[in-house]
Every structure is written in structure tokens, then in C-alpha cells.
Image (tube, rainbow, N blue to C red):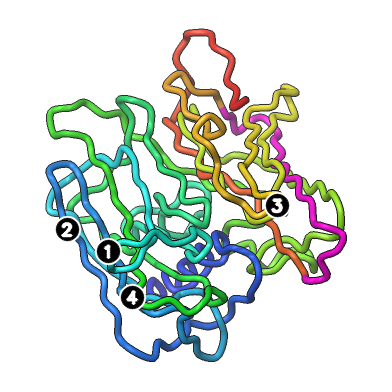
Amino acid sequence: MFRSLILLALSVFMISSAYADGGHDHHAVPTLKKQVGSKITYGENTATLTFGPIDLPTGHGEGDMGDSMPRFNFQLPEDKYLIGFKSALSTVEGKELPRNYLHHILMINNTRPSVSCPGEPLFFGGAGLEMAETHFPEGYGVKLEKNDKLMTVVAFYHGAPPTKNVIATFTMYFAPKTKPVQAMDIYQVGVNIVCFTKFGDRPADQTDEGIEIGAGVQVRTAPLKFSMDGCVKYAYPHGHDELLMIALENKTKKQTLLRTVPDVEQDGTLREFLPHQVYKDSQGFPISKADDYEMVMVYHHSLQKTELQHGMGNYLLYMTPGSCPAEKKTASAF
């Protein structure tokens, strides 16, 4: 039991680190100056998690792991299939806030093991500052059972300007009971290391914040081997400010499978990934244990900026096990 608790704590740290946005370090769980709450409310085919209200910037203890809300544990009242999700950030009064006030919302299933990170719990959804609304292809979903021990980790950016009564919400969409759904696995991939068990192998220029980005255009790559054969139906992208592109390529077959470009401000501040840049296809594209793959991310760090920038280029791949349907169709995100 003690070993399991340690693994859980380490895994939560891993996930929090891997999906944090740039600009500050992560070392220890902070201590809040006042108690804030979380709750879950259910609709017919939805569940909405509400976090806060909380005043920004949040108080931190010895370090800043970005874990500025108490972790919220919950279980669903019945077995359900998750078919999409969205996040939002506002004040209690309903004023919408800039999305970069949010550090991350992470959804973790402590009952089911991760496919991509053996020995760690399953990260099944969430959002960074991109806050992309997610709808899986029709007929596909992620199975969540009523006995699964679910947990969410929420953090706000400690560099946000003073703002009172901030709340974040995360809404999960579920398939109707009568609707047949094919279950998908979730696989984490990135240029930066995404599994806690491999953090000891990180290069010197990679921290919990991501990979240090130098001045000008920077292209970073990382080799990738999958531990399962599957058919990718949906790819949730994650990056930081100044990102130009992330991509997934099959080096064995010389195929670019994903090429995702964010919408940004003139100075490179990330706005969002527009819907046509988020891969979604019921046909899907295959991944194979036998092939060699590579993750790619391209950043541009303005020459006049002297502060360090840390980048990430990640996907959450939602896939069915085995091969794709026989129908021939080119898989492309562009």
C-alpha cells in the first residue's frame, strides 16, 4: 500500500510537470493561504467539475509545482464513456479570463494503468493554456467505470495579475446509455519526456518546465517507439508560447502523420489550436510497435527577449488497439 501511494504521488508530479506552461519552476506542493473548494455536478450526459473561487496570484510554499488547488478525488455514479471535454476560466461574476491564467487541469484515473508510461496511473484528459474543446469522432470514447478512482489536479499561473474570485470548470461529455461506443486507449508522446520514470534520463537543458529554447528558430526532435499497435482517432496537442509547430512522423515509412500549427499573437503568445488543426478522424491512422517514429517541435524565441523560454511539444493520442479499418484514406492534420 505504501509503495502504491509513493508511485501515485510521483506520477501526479510527473503529469503536473509534463503539462505545465513555461515561465516558472516546479519542485514542491505549495501551501494555500486559505481553503478553496471543488465540486462536481451532473447533467443527463455531462459532469462538470468546478474549482474555486480562488484569488490570484495563488500562494505557494517552498516551491511552485503549480498545484494551487487541493486535489479533488471523485467517482462516477455509473459506468460511462467519455466522448469529449472542455475547460473554461472566469470570475464568479461570469467575466471570462485570459486562458494563460490557467496552468493546467489534469484528469487522472488512479485505477487504470498508463499504456505509454508503465507503472504510472492513466492520464485521460485535461487542458493547458490551449484549452482546446475536445469531441472525439462519432462512436468512440474512453471508458470510465463507477469503481474507478478518479482525481483531478488543477493549477493557476502564479504570475497572473491580482484577480478575485476566479473559478475554473472542466466539463466532461458522456455518451448516452443506449449509444454503442468503441473504447479507446490514451497514449502520451512528446519531444520533452512525459513519463516520470524516465525523468532521470533528461538532458541538462530539459527541466520540469520543458526544453530550454534559445534565440531565434529552434527545431527539436525526439525518437519514439510505441509499445502497442493502434489506430489513432484523435490527437490533443499541447505547447507553450512561441511554438510554431509540433509533428509526429513515421521515420520507417517516411510519413508525416501529424502536423499541428497553433494560432498565436504577433509576439508569439499562444492563443489556441484552431479546430482544423486538431486531428480527428474516425478512419484514423496506424501506429506500430515495429516502426521508428519521431516527435518534432519548432519554436521561435524573439531575439530581443532576454528571459529564458521553455518549450513543449506533446500529443495525447486517443487510439483503438490493433489495426485501422480497411478503407483507404490519407491521414493528415493539414
Q: Label 3 sits on what residue type?
A: Gly
Q: Residue at x 17, y 41 (%)?
A: 45
Give the spatial CA distance, label 2 vs label 4: 19 Å
The residue labelled by disc 3 is 268
Q: Residues within 10 Å of mark 3 (few under 14, many from 20)?
A: some
The residue labelled by disc 4 is 165
Q: Position of residue 112 (x, y in %)?
A: 35, 53
**Picture quarter with the N terminus:** bottom left
Mark 1 or mark 2: whose residue is earlier in sequence: 2
Q: Label 4 sits on what residue type?
A: Asn
Front tag of 2 and 4: 4
Residue 267, quarter of the rendered image: bottom right
Mark 1 or mark 4: whose residue is earlier in sequence: 1
Q: Residues within 10 Å of mark 1 (few under 14, many from 20)?
A: some
- Is 147 on the left-hand or right-hand side of 296? left
Residue 39, quarter of the rendered image: bottom left
Give the spatial CA distance, label 4 vs label 3: 29 Å
The stretch in magenta equals 287-307
Q: Label 2 sits on what residue type?
A: Thr
Q: Position of residue 143 (x, y in %)?
A: 28, 42
Q: Are marks 1 and 2 in contact (CB under 8 Å)?
A: yes
The residue labelled by disc 2 is 41
Residue 13 in view (yes/no): yes
Give the spatial CA distance, label 3 vs label 2: 37 Å
Q: Residue at x 75, y 23 (%)?
A: 254
